[in-house]
């Protein structure tokens, strides 16, 4: 029996009067991509943000249950900076820092104490290659990151996340504003990355979950309705609410 | 929520049902032509094949279009893939009805070899299987579909019986051979039609329940 990378047990989240997540339990295995799908207000982003403690500073945030990574309770003694180094996050809107392409990637490693120029160059190249961006930007690393296209900016943010060598990457709607080609590149990057990382992908694009994830979890109104292998979810889901959602019958 | 997509699925369903009723009619007419020794009826069956072939192409094109444009999932996906497979089976059943009608045209030209007993019985079961498999599809009735699969053995047994009996006729005299072979072929075609009805029923179970039952896979997995 392989022990899970991330184990979520009875996770319950409230924001004041809003019950965002209701006793969700699930395991995420090493080197898998878990897709999380569900309509608006289903709790998928609250779930994702709980995994690197991004909800902590939200007013009236109450949480119960346990999340462990490699068996360690992330709400126990773990320091948040260490946790966020281990658990990287990519957001819906790419937000490059107002720096050059190179410095955008080098920023994180520098913050974690790496100062050798040679080492930083290596990290930047490796991260950009892993994010499928290197060939497009290798001749203009000193140029401002803001000049990149939306799709390139998103891959830059993925590279920035990779530069600090996380073990888990959380993607929150990473392709919501991207054209099909950029989307395909980001998806290709995710598939390549899964051999070295554990990936959680929250997406409103169910087809993306179908294309990319190994297993898919369907959330509805804060409840985990169903989690299973992606091919099972998209051909013969067990719960009618799941089929109604992926067939587009909701509303 | 009623989706625009549902309208298109309904359209596909209606085409498939149109084809199904045409094929059922062809099977029944081909057998009746043999029993009633009615050449005109057999010729009508042979002519109907074009219509079935055209419908097969239309249904294939329609299904591919729906897959490409809507990228359906779950029961929508199972419906369309089942429709494509059923489409295939129906087209083959139409061909087999034509084959029976052709045998019938030949047989009618000669005096009857023997009173037909087992073949009409086989035809009755086969037609019932075809009808039930399609009813199961329309009503999403996986239990009825499973019943159809279980009846396939009866048809196989009758087919063997017909073969053995006609073999004795052939051994009695060479002049019986042509007619006996024609009747053996009719039985064989009926047996193949029953196989296609079984295929359709297996697809219905997958469409309704999402479980594969082909090739007795369920029992094999349990072992």
Image (cartoon, coloured by chain):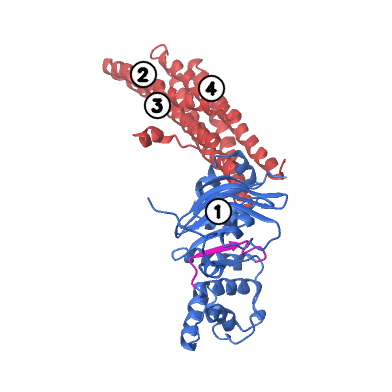
Q: Colour of chain B?
A: red
The local secondary structure at tag 2 comes to helix
Residue B42 visible from this viewpoint: no
Give me the disc on residue A210.
Answer: 1
Residue A69 point in image, percent of width and height? 48, 59
Query: Residue at image x 59%, y 62%?
Result: A53
Looking at the image, residue A154 lies above or below residue A58: below
**Crowd tier of the residue under label 2, counting other residues whose Cα lies within 10 Å: few below 14, some 14–19, many 20 or above:** many
Residue B182 point in image, percent of width and height? 39, 24
Q: Chain of mark 4?
A: B
Q: Colour of chain A?
A: blue
Measure how far apart labels 3 and 1 are at the Cα level. Answer: 44 Å
The magenta stretch is A165-178
Q: Is residue B7 magenta?
A: no
Give me the disc on residue B28.
Answer: 4
Asked if the residues shown at circle 1 and circle 4 are in contact, with their CB atoms under 8 angstroms apart, the answer is: no
Give me the disc on residue B188.
Answer: 3
Labels 1, 2: front one: 1
Asked if the residues shown at circle 3 and circle 1 are in contact, with their CB atoms under 8 angstroms apart, the answer is: no
């Amino acid at each position: 029996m392989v022990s899970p990378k991330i184990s979520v047990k009875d996770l319950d989240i409230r924001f004041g009067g809003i019950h965002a997540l209701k006793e969700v339990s699930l395991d995420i295995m090493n080197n898998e991509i878990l897709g999380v799908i569900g309509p608006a207000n289903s709790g998928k982003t609250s779930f994702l943000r709980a995994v690197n403690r991004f909800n902590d500073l939200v007013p009236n945030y109450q949480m119960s249950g346990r999340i462990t990574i490699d068996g360690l309770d992330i709400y126990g003694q773990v320091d948040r900076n260490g946790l966020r180094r281990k658990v990287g996050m990519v957001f819906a809107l790419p937000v490059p820092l107002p720096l050059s392409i190179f410095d955008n990637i080098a920023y994180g490693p520098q913050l974690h104490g790496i100062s050798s120029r040679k080492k930083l160059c290596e990290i930047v190249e490796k991260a950009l290659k892993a994010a499928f961006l290197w060939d497009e930007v290798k001749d203009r690393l000193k140029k401002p990151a803001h000049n990149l296209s939306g799709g390139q900016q998103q891959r830059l943010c993925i590279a920035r996340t990779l530069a600090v060598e996380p073990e888990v990457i959380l993607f929150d709607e990473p392709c919501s504003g991207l054209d099909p080609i950029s989307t395909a590149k980001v998806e290709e990057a995710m598939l390549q990355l899964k051999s070295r990382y554990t990936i959680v992908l929250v997406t409103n694009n169910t087809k993306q979950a179908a294309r990319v994830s190994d297993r898919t979890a369907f959330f509805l109104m804060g409840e985990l309705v169903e989690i299973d292998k992606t091919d099972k979810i998209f051909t013969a889901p067990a719960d009618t609410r799941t089929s109604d959602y992926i067939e587009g019958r909701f509303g | 929520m009623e989706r625009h997509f549902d309208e298109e699925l309904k359209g596909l369903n209606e085409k498939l049902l149109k084809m199904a009723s045409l094929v059922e009619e062809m099977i029944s007419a081909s057998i009746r032509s043999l029993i009633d020794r009615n050449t005109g009826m057999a010729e009508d069956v042979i002519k109907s094949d074009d219509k079935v072939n055209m419908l097969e192409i239309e249904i294939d094109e329609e299904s591919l279009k729906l897959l490409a444009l809507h990228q359906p999932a779950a029961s929508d996906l199972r419906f369309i893939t089942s429709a494509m497979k059923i489409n295939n089976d129906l087209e083959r059943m139409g061909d087999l009805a034509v084959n029976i009608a052709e045998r019938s045209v030949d047989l009618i030209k000669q005096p009857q070899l023997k009173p037909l007993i087992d073949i009409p019985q086989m035809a009755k079961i086969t037609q019932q299987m075809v009808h039930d498999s399609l009813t199961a599809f329309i009503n999403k009735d996986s239990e009825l579909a499973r019943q159809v699969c279980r009846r396939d053995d009866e048809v196989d047994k009758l087919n063997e019986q017909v073969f053995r009996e006609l073999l004795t006729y052939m051994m009695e005299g060479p002049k019986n051979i042509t007619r006996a072979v024609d009747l053996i072929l009719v039985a064989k075609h009926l047996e193949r039609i029953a196989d296609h009805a079984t295929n359709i029923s297996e697809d219905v179970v997958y469409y309704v329940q999402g479980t594969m039952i082909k090739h007795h896979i369920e029992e094999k997995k349990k072992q």
